[in-house]
Image (cartoon, rainbow, N blue to C red):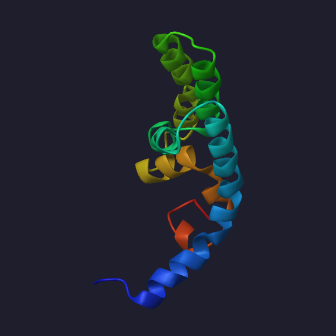
Amino acid sequence: MSPTRSEFFQGVRASLPIVAAAAPFGMLFGALAVDNGLTVGEAVLMSATVFAGASQMVGLELFGASIAPWIVVLSVFAVNFRHVLYSAALGRLDRVVQAVAEADRILLSHRSPVCSVRGAG
């Protein structure tokens, strides 16, 4: 069963609050990245590969300070370690719900058809 065009646009409409909540953070990171000397391509690559926004900010500051790359990587892992604690607290829930909860707690607080997984809305 393939989704219809109207189902696609229903999903787009349901996602708009999440996009509106996340867009300012993306614009802030983009502006800081360019200000710290990254090209647009490098900023997009960093956004695609670094898991959390806080880690992106730490990475930007450390890259700008010309610190050894292993210290940058270790610092980013240290900031992301909080997700290990989140997953331990959610240990009894399904893996899908854990992934959503760790990746985007904004999604869990929004009631929409997109949040139809158990416990998400």
> So how many labels did they put on this image?
0
Image coordinates of residue 78 in percent, x first then y, are 56, 20
Residue 82 point in image, percent of width and height: 59, 29
Please give the name of the residue rendered at 64% of the width and 30% of the height, measured from the top-left corner: 36
Instruction: Tell me: residue 8, above or below residue 94.
Output: below
Q: Nearer the viewer, residue 102 or 57?
A: 57
Q: Nearer the viewer, residue 110 or 29?
A: 29
Q: Is residue 74 above or below residue 6?
A: above
Quadrant containing the C terminus is: bottom right
Vertical placement of residue 42 versus 77, above or below: below
Across and down, in percent, residue 18 comes to 64, 63
Could you tell me which quadrant the N terminus lies in?
bottom left
Query: What residue is rendered at 54% in x and 46% in y?
Result: 103
Q: Is residue 8 above or below residue 55?
A: below
Q: Quadrant of residue 38?
A: top right
Locate residue 107: give its quadrant: bottom right
Which residue is rendered at x = 36% and y = 83% of the image?
3
Residue drawn at the location 64% of the way across and 33% of the way down: 54
- Between residue 31 and residue 106, name the one nearer to us: 31
